[in-house]
Image (cartoon, rainbow, N blue to C red):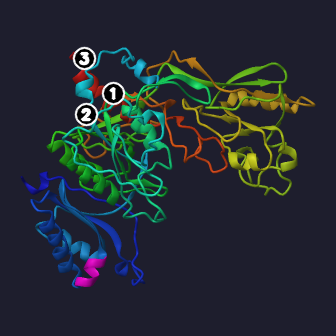
């Protein structure tokens, strides 16, 4: 195959520095990926080839050995190494090298949705076929103790499975549902003290269970969205490749996960990760997905959360199924009631029920700190802007922003946040909170300023019918495709707003360290949540409708 067709991509900006290098950028080693095309016939010979090639440009065998980070030999031919600028140039001039790119950090694109898509629990299924499907997920790991990953009723893994389960740290085992789990931590700027495939973030468990979680009746987040939580194809097996850590998802680790997943025997690959790219050849996901497609493995990827900005779509290679996020016919509303009887339908995921009928209400301006600098804007309710004595036990009206930890730390009970552009997406906070429209916020401000003892209460969120569906989520990245304008991206949209799915008890519901709520389910929004739906829609077409 022509060299240019053999997709080449790399990546990342971890900028690992060797302790023995100092000075200008010409003497500081940084992480690069060197892509060389098709997988070699022999892993041993490829590893030797990588070392010999690196030695030839470094001019020192010992430094070359120390510089190499990883060799990719199973599904494609590449290696990662810490290189100097002149070494990068020499490699780019080598006829056996397709491309050389700096390594960067990519980002995560952070239930009832299947009924909305026309795949009810009663849908006819071919469990024998579905039971033989393996979905490879590249994400933050998996929390196998979540009910969604129970393997009751599952037989042993399919005979085609060649993967492994890395039992390390507090990750004790896989099962016949989660048949594989690996982790990669070759380029993290803050190495984990005890790395393992376990999910300490919740994102990987959420996406995995959306794809293939077992049917669990009575699932909810503190009573919200109560019902049966299930993946699109509950009988499918899951293989987790943990490539994301607290500081992001390294291109080096992404390449390693894809190299293994393709070789392990997965049937589909789901990746809810992405970053900016100027070419199909400077992106690890694009490279890996190309080699996966050559083996008949479809890779589905999230489109990104930078909408509604145009030209913001990510993961745009033509061999990737790129998925944007849409809304569905359910949304969560948080009722706010003022002391004068006015009721406002706010937006958030609020799990807190009030213990009182009413709470004192103030505004950020009334509660502003006396030491606040003259040009500081107190409405943002950010660090140092409020007087704790004026906030304690009260609900605070903020505008265009909120540092929830700060309001909680100084004793605030809750917050009402007035926004000029109200989003279509609710979020979870560490204190009772609701977003409201700016026009309504102005009315609340007038009420507070004209009342001797203003009061309000923020109720627990409730699910309501959303008649505006279907619609594209405001955060979902838009086209056109900046790399190939004639290739339309995203390819499709799927539910990505307020999705209930499995979570990790090692991360709080809001992800905040001050939050003491931990659950095996959570409600999250993002194209990350939309992407797994497409894995299942493909199965619907192939395995359900046909029957």
Q: Is 41 located above or below residue 23 in the figure?
A: above
Secondary element at image label 3: loop
The disc placed on residue 233 is: 1
Q: Name the residue rendered at 87%, 45% in the picture.
A: 390
Towards the viewer: 403 or 256: 256
Which of the two discs, 2 and 1, labels the residue nearer the N terminus? 2
Q: Which residue is mark 3?
A: 545
Q: CA distance from mark 1 to mark 3?
A: 13 Å
Q: CA distance from mark 3 to mark 2?
A: 17 Å
Contact flag, marks 2 and 1 (Cβ < 8 Å): yes
In the image: residue 417, left or right of residue 70: right
Q: In the picture provided, is 345 more to the left or to the right than 328?
A: right
Q: Which residues are magenta?
A: 61-66
Does residue 65 belong to the magenta stretch?
Answer: yes
Q: Residue furthest right?
A: 452
Give the mark, 3 or 2, whose residue is nearer the N terminus.
Answer: 2
Main secondary structure found in the magenta portion: helix
In front: 183, or 470? 183
Which is more toward the observer, 400 or 329?
Answer: 329
Q: Place residue 428 in its image quadrant.
A: top right
Answer yes or no: is residue 93 visible. no
Q: Position of residue 47 (x, y in %)?
A: 18, 68
Give the foreground label among 1 and 3: 1
User: How far is disc 2 from disc 1 in space, using C-alphas?
Assistant: 9 Å
Q: Is residue 223 visible to the viewer in this orientation of the structure?
A: yes
Task: Return the mark for residue 371.
Answer: none
Residue holding disc 2: 133
The residue drawn where x is 21% and y is 62% is 78
The picture places residue 171, in percent across and down from the top left corner, at 44, 51
Q: Callout 1: helix, strand or loop?
A: loop
């Amino acid at each position: 195959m022509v060299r240019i067709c053999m997709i080449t991509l790399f990546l990342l900006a971890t900028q690992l520095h060797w302790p023995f290098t100092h000075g200008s950028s010409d003497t500081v080693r940084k992480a690069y990926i060197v892509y060389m095309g098709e997988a070699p016939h022999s892993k041993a010979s490829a590893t030797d080839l990588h070392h010999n090639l690196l030695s030839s440009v470094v001019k020192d065998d010992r430094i070359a050995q120390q510089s190499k980070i990883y060799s990719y030999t199973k599904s494609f031919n590449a290696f990662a190494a810490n290189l100097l600028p002149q070494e990068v140039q020499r490699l780019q001039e080598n006829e056996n090298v397709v491309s050389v790119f700096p390594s960067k950090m990519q980002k995560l694109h952070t239930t009832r949705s299947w009924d909305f898509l026309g795949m009810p629990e009663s849908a006819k299924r071919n469990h024998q076929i579905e039971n033989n499907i393996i979905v490879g997920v590249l994400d933050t790991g998996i929390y196998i103790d979540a009910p969604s990953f129970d393997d009751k009723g599952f037989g042993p893994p399919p005979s085609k499975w060649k993967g492994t389960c890395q039992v390390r740290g507090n990750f004790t085992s896989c099962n016949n549902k989660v048949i594989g789990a690996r982790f990669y931590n070759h380029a993290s700027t803050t190495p984990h003290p005890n790395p393992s495939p376990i999910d300490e973030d919740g994102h990987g468990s959420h996406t995995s269970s959306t794809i293939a979680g077992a049917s669990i009746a009575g699932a909810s987040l503190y009573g919200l969205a109560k019902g049966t939580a299930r993946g699109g194809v509950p009988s499918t097996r899951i293989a987790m490749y943990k490539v994301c850590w607290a500081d992001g998802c390294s291109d080096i680790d992404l390449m390693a996960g894809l190299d293994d997943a393709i070789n392990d025997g997965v049937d589909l690959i789901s990746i809810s990760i992405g970053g900016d790219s100027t070419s199909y050849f400077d992106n690890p996901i694009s490279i890996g997905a190309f080699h996966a497609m050559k083996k008949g493995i479809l890779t589905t990827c999230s489109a990104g959360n930078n909408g509604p900005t145009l030209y913001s779509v990510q993961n745009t290679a033509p061999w990737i199924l790129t998925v944007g996020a849409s809304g569905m016919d359910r949304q969560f509303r948080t009722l706010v009631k003022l002391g004068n009887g006015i009721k406002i339908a706010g937006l958030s995921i609020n799990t807190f029920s009030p213990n009182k009928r009413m709470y004192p209400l103030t505004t950020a301006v009334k509660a502003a700190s006396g030491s606040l600098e003259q040009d500081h804007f107190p409405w943002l309710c950010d660090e140092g802007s409020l007087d704790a004595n004026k906030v304690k036990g009260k609900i605070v009206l903020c505008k265009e922003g909120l540092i929830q930890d700060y309001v909680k730390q100084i004793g605030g009970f809750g917050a009402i946040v007035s926004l000029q552009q109200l989003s279509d997406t609710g979020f979870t906070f560490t204190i009772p909170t609701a977003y409201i429209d700016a026009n309504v916020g102005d009315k609340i401000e007038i009420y507070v300023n004209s009342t001797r003892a203003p009061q309000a209460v923020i109720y627990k969120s409730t699910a309501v019918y959303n008649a505006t569906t279907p619609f594209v989520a405001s955060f979902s990245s838009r086209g056109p495709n900046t790399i190939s304008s004639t290739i339309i991206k995203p390819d499709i949209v799927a539910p990505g707003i307020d999705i209930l799915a499995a979570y990790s008890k090692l991360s709080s519901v809001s992800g905040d360290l001050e939050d003491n709520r931990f659950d095996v389910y959570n409600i999250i929004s993002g194209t990350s949540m939309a992407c797994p739906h497409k894995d299942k829609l493909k199965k619907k077409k192939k395995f359900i409708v046909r029957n």
